[in-house]
Structures are given as C-alpha cells and as structure tokens.
Image (cartoon, rainbow, N blue to C red):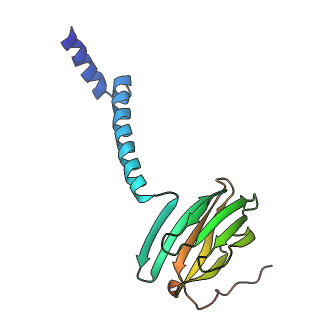
Amino acid sequence: MRQENERYLSWLQGAPNTFPSLAHRIEELEGEKGDLLAKTSACVNNGKVSASVTPGGYIDVGEARRGRTFIDPKTGISIGVAKVGADYTADIVLGIPDAETPRQLKEVKPGAFWYAKVGTETYRVTVTDVNWLSDSIRAEVRDARSVSVSGPPERAPIE
C-alpha cells in the first residue's frame, strides 16, 4: 500500500497544477529565495547601496529614512533625515567632519548638491531621490574630481 501511495504521489508531483507539484515547486522557490537573500545581505549593509572607486574617483550611494542617518564610510560625511514632505522635499542635516556644526537644510529637493572639503579632498554631496512614500532620501557622495565642471546644460525657456 505504501509503495502504491508513493507511486501516485510521484505521478502527481510530475503533473503541473496539482497540489503536490505546486508544494514541491514552493519548496524549491523558498530555497532560491534564501540564496538570493544571503547574496543581497552580503551586498547591502545598513542601508548602504554601493561604494566603489571608479576611474573618475570615489563614489558612495546611501539611503536614509526619517529619523535615521546615512554616514559615508570613507569621508565621514553624514546626512540625517528630519522630515520628508508630500511635496517630495526633505529637511535634512548635513554633517561634514571638518565643520564646526552640522548644517540644517530645509525643503531640499532631488538634485540639490553641496561641496564638502574633508582633509585635502573635496567631495560633492548630492540628494538624488526624495521619496515621500517610503519616507526616505537617497544621496551620493562623490569625489569632486569626477564631476564635470563645464557648467549646467543649456535649458529651453519655460513657457
């Protein structure tokens, strides 16, 4: 009787859209999910998305939610998020290690940037994303030498 049940179970597992087949597939997908989560956690650490040295210089991208701070590991530049508005602006605190006090910046929009001198190097800090839905911002700290200094692009007049 046991052999016969195992034979029926193997037939059902081989047939698509049957419960035993779907249960087996769910187990496989759970295993794949665990592998992907392990790989992701190795890449993402505490809100940090990526950091690298490119041919143009150093770049680090990080994210911070309201009430939290992103701290660049190389420069020590910190960006704290006090408030994220529904108009996709944020109140932030920009901390630069060589400065006396952090700067309180109100209603910062995506694309806003500042230059910060840390030691002998200059870095450009850019707010790249203000996301009201996730109550977070994303910012980039980049070696200023890798930033084009040709000036802003020509803009068409607004009508």
Residue 11 vertical placement versus 82 (above, below):
above
Q: Which quarter of the figure has residue 82?
A: bottom right
Q: Residue at 38%, 24% (x, y): give it.
A: 19
Left-right relation of 55 to 81: left
Identity of the residue drawn at 37% across and 28% down: 23
Q: Which residue corresponds to the image point at 61% horizontal and 74% vertical from the top-left?
A: 126
- Image-based side of 67 in relation to 85, left or right: left
- What number of labels is visible? 0
Residue found 60% across the figure and 80% down from its top: 98
Residue 13 versus residue 124 in the image, above or below? above
**Residue 148 found in image quarter:** bottom right
User: Can residue 104 be seen by looking at this rendering?
Assistant: yes
Expressed as whole percent of the image width and height from the top left, the position of residue 154 reads 67, 87
Viewer-side residue, 31 vs 47: 47
Q: Tell whether 55 sits left or right of 6.
A: right
Measured as percent of width and height from the top left, residue 95 is found at: 63, 72
Question: In the rendered view, would you say 143 is above or below 6?
Answer: below
Could you say where residue 42 lies in the image, as x and y percent from the top left? 39, 56
Q: Residue lying furthest bottom in this view?
A: 150
Q: Nearer the viewer, residue 101 or 121?
A: 101
Q: Quadrant of the C terminus?
A: bottom right
Q: Pick out the residue farthest to the left.
A: 3
Check the image and report above or below for 19 versus 73: above
Q: Which is more toward the observer, 20 or 107?
A: 107
Front one among 39 and 148: 39
Q: Please identify the quadrant where the N terminus is shown.
A: top left
